[in-house]
Image (spheres, rainbow, N blue to C red):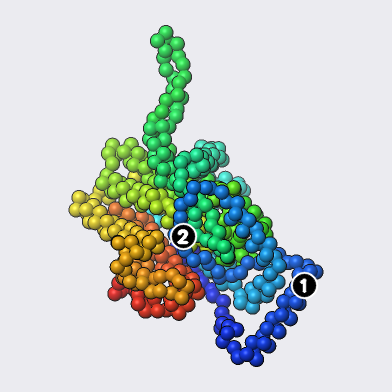
Amino acid sequence: ITVSLGKMVTTRSARKAPRPTTEELPPTTRKSRAKKTASTKTEAAKKLEVSPPAVERKLLSSPSPARPTSTSTSSTGSAKKEIKAKSNGEVKKSASAAKRLKEEGFEYEFGGPIGALATTILLPIVTLLLTACASAGRVEPFFSSFVLGGSANADEPFLSRLLSNPVLFPGCQKDGFKTLLQCTACVLGWFLFQVVLERLLPCEIVEGAPLKGSKSGERLKYRINGHLAFWVTILVVFVGWPSWTEITLPGGSAARTIQFGRAPLGLLYDYHAELALSTVLLCVVLSTYLYMRSRDPNLLRADGGNSGSTVYDFFMGRELNPRWGSFDWKEFCELRPGLIGWALLNMAMVVKQQEKLGYVTGSMMLINAFQGLYVWDALYQERAILTTMDITTDGFGFMLVFGDLAWVPFTYSLQARYLVDHDPHLSAWALAAVLATNALGYCIFRGANGQKDAFRRNPDAPQVKHLKYLQTKRGTRLLTSGWWGAARKINYTGDWIMGLSWCMLCGFDSIVPYYYAIYFAILLVHRSIRDDGMCKAKYGEDWDEYKRLVPYRFVPGLF
C-alpha cells in the first residue's frame, strides 16, 4: 500500500554474523562458554526477582506454512492456554529478549515510523481523491480543494468545509453531518450483517497454521463459510430486501405490509464518496481499539508490530490474532465485508448505468464478470488464506484494517464507477481481446495456486507427483518444475494480467482507471522482495540454491 503512494523506503538494520554452534567449537572453548552462560543466567535471574519487565517477543520468527485440516469441534481452549503459557514464560525471559533487541536492532519496513505515519495519513486522502477522479473521469487538481473544502469561510471546522465540497462529497450538500451519520450507520449495518452470516450460517471448522512459537503445534480454528455468505448476500440484496408498502384491502381500508424485492443499489453510486469517508473513519476507530487491547501482555503479538514505536506498531498491528471468543477479527475482515462489498458496489454501478443510459454496456458487463469471478474465487478458496503471510505473520493494525475494509472496496471498484459516466463503448473485437487477456491471467493465477495447494496437501497425488522439488534442511519441499519452475512468483504475474484487463475495459482516454495496474505492479514487486527476505531467513542456503534453480521472479526468461 505504501509503495502505491511513492513513499516506500525500506530500512534494514545490519545483522551480526551468526556465532558458531556449541558442536562446532573445541572442547576447551565449549567449557568456557558453558561457564559464561551459566553466570549470565544467574545474573539475569537475580534481576528478574527485583523488577520483572514487560513482555518482549522474539523478533524475525515466522511459522512455517501448513495446510489447514478439518475438525469437528470449534473449541479454542487449548490454543488459548498455549498462548497464555507462552506469554507467562516470556515474562521471565524478557530481560534477555530486551538485550537481544538492543544488540540486533529492529528491522523496520515501509520506511519505519515516519513512513508508517505518512502512509496512515495519506491513504485515506488518496482513497477519497480516487473516488472523485473516477467521477470526473480525469485527474483533477483536487488537493487544494481537499484542504480548503467547498466553503470560502476559513473559520468553519475542517470537517464541515470538507463535507461542503461539491466535488468530493456531492451527496452532502444539503445536510453534510446528517448524511455522514446515515452513511456511517449503513456501513456499520453492513459489517454487522456479515458478522451475523459468519456466526449463523453452516460452516466447516478448519485449523490454521501452527501458532507462532508453539512447540506443541497448537492451531487456531476458523469458521469457513464465506462462500455461502456471498450467495446469501446476493439473494438478500436482489430478492430479499424488505420494505413497507401501503396496500388497499378488499373493504377499501388501507394497511401497511412488508414486501420483498431488490435493494436500492443506486444509492451506493449516489453516496459513493460519503460511504468511503464513513468507512475510513470506522477503520481509524477499529485500529485504535485493536492497538489499545494489544497492550495486554498475555496476548500473542506479531513480530513486525512489536517495535516499541507507537506510530509504527499502530500501523503494522501488534496483536497477531485478535479474537472475541471464536470470532477472529483478522480472518473475518480479510474476505467478508470488504471483498463482498467490492462486488456489491460493482453491481450498484450496473444498476446506475442502466438507469442513466437505458442499457448496460459490454465493458460494464465484463468488469462485473471479471471482478465477480475474482471475488467468488477468493471466497470459494477461503481456507487457502489461513497459510498466507497476512494470517500467520502480520499483525492486525491499520495497514490490514484499512486495506481490507476501505482500500479494496472503494478503489478496486473504481473501473465500474468510471464506466457509469465515461464508458468508451468498445467494439466487439476489443472486448474479445480484453476477454482473452483476462482468461490468460486467470489460467496462470489459478493454475499456479492450485498446483501449489495440491502439492502441499498430498505430494504423491497423481496430478502433482511428477513435479520436481528441492528438499530443504527444514524438511519442507520447494517446487522447481511446473508453474513454480517457470518463475518464483508466477501467480503474481497472472494476478497482474487480470488486473490489467480490468483497466483495458475503460479504454485509453484517461489514466485514472489504470491506477490499479500501476499500483498493483509496484505492490507485487515490493511484496516479492519482502517474501524473498523472509524466505532467505527461513531457508538459508537452500533458498540460494532454489533461486539458482528458478532464477526468474515473474516472467520466465525476462524478469
Q: Give the label on residue 387, or none.
A: 2
User: Residue 524: percent from the left, percent from the top?
Assistant: 41, 65
Q: Amino acid at mark 1?
A: Lys
Kindly give the residue lying farthest to the right in the view shown. 50
Horizontally, is 340 left or right of 176 in the view?
A: left
Q: Quadrant of the C terminus?
A: bottom left
- In primary-sequence order, the first of circles 2 and 1 is 1
Residue drawn at point x = 79 percent, y = 69 percent: 49
The part of the image, by quadrant, that contains residue 441 is bottom left
Q: Is residue 177 above or below residue 81?
A: above
Q: Which residue is mark 1?
A: 47
Q: CA distance from mark 2 to mark 1?
A: 39 Å
Q: Secondary structure at mark 2?
A: helix
Pick the front one: 204 or 359: 204
Q: Residue at x 42, y 25 (%)?
A: 259
Q: Mark yes or no: residue 314 visible.
A: no
Above or below for 43 versus 32: above
The answer to whether mark 2 and mark 1 are in CB contact below 8 A is no
The residue closer to the viewer here, 111 or 156, is: 111
Return the residue nearer the eye: 232 or 110: 232
